[in-house]
Every structure is written in structure tokens, then in C-alpha cells.
Image (spheres, coloured by chain):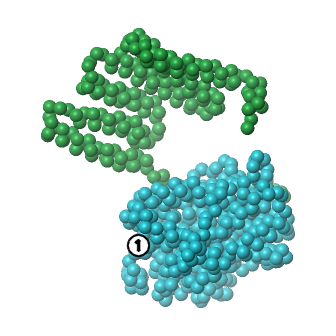
Chain colours: A cyan, B green
Amino acid sequence: MKKNTLTQNDNRTWFKLDNAAKIFPGQNSATWSNIIRTSVNLKENIDPEILSAALKRCLPRFPAIAVQIKRGFFWYYFEPNRKEPIVKPDINNPCVRIKYNENNRFLFRIFYYKNRISLEAFHALTDGYGCAVFLSTVTAEYLRIKGYDIPCGGMVLDINEPPKASELEDSFAKYATSKVKAKRPALPTYHRTGEKLPKHISIMTSGYIPVEKIKSISKSHGVTITEYLASVLVMVHIKLQKEENLRKQKEVSIQIPVNCRNLFDSGTLRNFSVCYSVRIDPNLGEYTFEEILRQVSLYLRYTNNKKHLQSMFAANMGLEKNPIMRIIPLIIKDLAIGISFSLTAEHTTTSLLTNLGKICVPEKMADYIDSYIFMPSPGKVNGGRVGVVSFGNTMTVTFTNIYNNTAIERDFFRFLVKQGIPVKIESNRNL
Amino acid sequence: MSYCVNCGVELSDSAKKCPLCDTPVINPNALNKDESPAFPKNFEIPKASRKSYIAFIISLILLLPNIVCVITNLLMTPHLLWSVYVVSSSVLIWFLFIFPFLMKKSRPYLTITADAVVTAVFIFVFYYYNSPRTGWFWTVAVPIDAAAFITIGLLIFYFRKKRSLLKSIIAYLTALIFINIFICLLVFFVLDSVLITYFTAIIAISCIIMLVFFIVVERNYRLRAWLSRKFFF
């Protein structure tokens, strides 16, 4: 590897963090890691040395991921990181917080275990889509070194071509053209409570589901898979809240991140997704599952459009561009972000459901892959946060839970089983 | 391939219990499971950010103005030792708020003892430099200091187990009454200051009334039930 690949391809020696990424370093704490984990299950066991070689070959193609984070006086910034990336055996507690000075200063980790390669990336680097592209490209290169003939295409980038400028752009800044700034909902919502697991430990439960089954069932209700799963999650939370016998029921709100690349013309490999919150108030009366489905799907279809998204970008950009915000030293910004997010953020959402969608890799490569797993970072107060990804005919629904109680997962998967959807469960719980 | 009898979900071959509902998997046909689990057993816990390091930095920052004050004092007004107040205040702040974070394990009794001694020294500096030396330091300040910190020590000892709200209220009230009666008697016999005696006596008496009420409520289950019935809101 040439030493200066990065600077030859792209003359920038440092990056600004993109608009969405700016808040994550301030929140990074022992209880809130903001790490997203994407895994791929191959059909054979992993050879760590080959994996390490593949990773080294791929990194120059991803200048936005091969970075280290530095503190400026007013903002954090990224600098290219030319150290050797580390490949480690997997651990039992995924999505543990990242420390900037460890791991050769990389903000992502690559793990291997049996037939699985896992990528854990700090959310400031990229979102779920970026992670999937990076992991798929590394996996393709891994398979190539193993001697298989894998072409490029879909989420597998050609590592021999130089990185494109469009992959490094901050698309939020480009598309925040709306004059109206969307308001953020700030109502307190229901939260699963209970005995918390020790710090840095979370329960991860994956359910493998055949895509065709869930597709046909959600189609029969006239909704998409995301809408269907979000409705099940809402229903489970409403039911659990009812069992707690509170005097006043709180709203249940599910955060659903949207990959904005689908709506806007953007090929960025940095963050480009924003969250919608679907809210249902159980105080209005008993909701049947059909009613929840209708509410969730209508809400999402009503709000999910370019105009509304742009007003959300504008609200986020406004905060970044605010002259007072800019002039405040980083040390105070960090404190303020930490405090404000521990007071609002997750307190205004019950849970999160993020659907990475379908992973597209070349057909030849698909033969060697069994399934993908995608999980969001464990919450600070939210119980079951859900990550969904589908590959081929396998959809993986993964819960991360910080409480020592798996009621949400249990009720969710039991409901799917009752609807006639077979589910296979895998977990990191030590039973 | 086993299924959970409770949830109906398929389980991985390595599962001995259902991860969702903890129901044990009993499959007579698959007794010899050699399959390794879905996740390895080893954990990775990142190191906590060192509190002692931050405490050390704050100590250094606190040290700077002190050095400056002492040097200025010695160079410019060697006959007037005003920097003693700055240094003694800094030492007191350091012992009260920073010293506990420098220890690897929390040692409450050691911290309390150190705090008591340093507070006494702090008062002594003022007594020695800035007041008619009528002996009040030994007759009033030291006993009050000792009594206050002994009470705090006793409270810490009492609260090493978690106590109910009523019991905590009773403990705090008792501590307050003890301190007040102590000050009341001390001031009455040593200083002959009727004003402070009245003041502390009023606090002590009102606290005693509250204490009696809380003790009765705490002891009497039926009264507690009656109260919660009458005053629910």
C-alpha cells in the first residue's frame, strides 16, 4: 500500500464532521456508545489473517472511514489515519463504547467469530448504509483473496478506483434548502423500565425470518415491512405499559430513521439519514392491531416526503450554522450536548426501529453469504431498539436491550410466530 | 434443531434455554450438543475515565494561584501574612472536594476524619491571626467541629444499608437535634450567649416534635394506612 494514497486521491488533509455526526462525540459516554453494528454470516469459517489483509486493501477506498477524530478549539474534526487497522476476535458484549485513543485511533472495529465478520462503527463516521457498503466491500475482498471470483456492483465498491468526491460530501448541507425549520417533538414518552444490566453490557437477540413470508403478510394488510414491524413494536409497548397499571398512560413513540439517499440524489458514504417519530397515545382508547397499522402507515406516508425531510435538515443545519453555537468552545459544547441529550433525546422516544433494507451484492458473491445482521446502538433508557436488514430470503430483526428483561423481544417474536411467520432466535445471553 | 415450547421460535443448536423466556430446551434426540454458542463468552469492558486524573489536574490548577499569592506576599509585604488565608482556604476546598476522588477505593471514615482535622486547622488559622485569643477555638470551635463530624460519621455508618424514607427522615432529624442540643448546651455554659441558646433550642424543640410524629408513624402500621387513605392525592 502506498503511504499517501489518501492525499493523492483527495487533497484534503482533514474533514469536518457532517451535520448529523456533530452531536455524537459530545454524547459518547459509558452508557451511550452510539455504535452501530453490522455483521455478515458467511458459509465458511473466517480466517483472521486474510480478513486483516482484505481490510488493509479496502481502507484507502474509504477515506471517510479511515479517519481519526481530533479536538479542535470549536469543533471536532477528522484526520486521515494511516495506521494499521486491527482485526479482533468477537466479544460477548457488542456495541461497547469507543475510546478515541484506543484501537490505533480508528473509530470502527472489525471482529470475527466462527463464520461471522462484524463491523462496529461509531455513528459519527457513517450511518447504516455506509456501514453496509464498507462491510460488503471488505467481505468481497476477503472472498477474492480466498480465491473466489467476485465482481463489483451493488454495495460492493471497486477498490481499485479512486474515491469519488460525492462519497465524501455532507449531503445535509447540500439539501438543507428549506426556509421552514421542522420542530422537534419533545413530549415525555413511555419507557420500559426494570433492572439495568451492568454498564457496557447489553442483550442482543436476533430473529431470522423468511422475507417472502413477512412480505406476503404485510402485503395482505396493505403496508410495507417497516410499517408492519413498527406497528408490532408499538403494539408490544402499549401492551407492556398497560400491564404496569400506571394511573396515566404515556404516549408510545417509535423512532424510524429514513435513508435519505432514496429520495435525494446523493451517493455519500457519510451520515445521510434522519428520524421520524411515529406516536400513538394509548389514553385515547384501546387500539386494535389493525388500527395501529393504519395509524403508523398513514403517518409515515403522509410525512415521508422531500419537503418535510428538507425542513428537518434545515432545523439541524440551523443549529450548526448559528453564530452563537459556532463561537462556543468545544469543551462547553460537549458539556451542553451531554446535558441536553441526557434530558431530551431518548426521553422523547420509546424505542427505535431502523430498517437498513435489502443488501445488494453481486450474484456470484451471494452464494458465499448466509445472512446479514444489523443492530443499532443500545439505548440509554430505551429498552428494545431494533435493527432490521434483509439479504436474499433472510430478514434479520435484532433487538438490543439494556435491561435484564426480554419481555419486548419475547412478545414481538411470539406475535410474529402467531401470525404464521417462522422465527429462528440467536442471542448473546449466557444462559 | 429445537423449538421453544413456550414461544414457538426455532432456537440455535447451542441454546440450552430459550433466550426469550428462559424455558429450558429438552430435546431427547439431540442430547450431545457440541455446537459452540452464537457469541463467545469473553467480555470487553472499556476502562472508566480516571477520576483521579481529573482530580489531579484540578489540584494543579488550584495550586497555581496559591503559589502566586505566597510569592507576592513574601516579596511585597513580608510583615503581613495575608496569603495564609488563601492557602488555608484552598487546602480546605481541596480536602473537602478533591481529596475523595484521588483515592482508588472510597474510604468514608478516613475522609471524614481528614475533613474534621482540616476544618479545625482552617478555623485555627483565623483564630490565630485574626481574633482576640480568648480561647474560643479550644472551648467552642473544636467541640462543635468534632460533634458535627462524629454525627456525619454515625449517619454514614447507619446508611451503609439502604433505609426506608421514614427511617432516613428519623435519622436525619435525630442528627440535627443532637447537634443543636450540643451547641445549645455548649454555648450556654461556655459563652453565656442567650441569643444563640434560644435559637438552637427552638430548632431542637421543633425537630423533636417532628421526630416524635415520624417515630409514631413509622411504628404504627394502622396509622400509616389511615394517613395514606386520608391524604392521597
Dot 1: element: strand
Against A232, residue B203 (above or below) is above
Image quadrant containing the N terminus of chain B: bottom right
Q: Is residue B116 left or right of residue B37?
A: left
Q: Chain of mark 1?
A: A
> Residue at position x 82%, y 66% from top?
A291
Q: Residue at x 77, y 27 (%)?
A: B226
Where is residue A373, by image quadrant?
A: bottom right
Q: Exactly how many numbered labels are in the figure?
A: 1
Q: Quadrant of the C terminus of chain B?
A: top right
Q: Amino acid at mark 1?
A: Glu
Q: Position of residue B44 (x, y in %)?
A: 54, 57
Q: Residue at x 47, y 19 (%)?
A: B199
Kindly indicate the quadrant of the structure image that contains residue A313: bottom right
Q: Position of residue B101 (x, y in %)?
A: 42, 42
The residue lying toward the viewer, choosing from A290 and B20, is A290
| Of residues B147 and A412, the one drawn nearer to the viewer in this rendering | B147
Query: Residue A273, image x and y in percent?
Result: 59, 73
* Residue name at image x 60 percent, y 50 percent: A198
For the question of whether residue B170 can be seen, the reply is yes
Q: Residue under circle 1?
A: A79
Q: Quadrant of residue A388?
A: bottom right
The front one of B53 and B125 is B125
x, y percent for residue A262: 63, 81
What crowding class fits label 1: few (fewer than 14 Cα within 10 Å), some (14-19), or many (20 or more)? some
Q: Is residue B212 above or below residue B227?
A: above
Q: Nearer the viewer, residue B13 or B75?
A: B75
Q: Is residue A59 in view from this perspective?
A: no
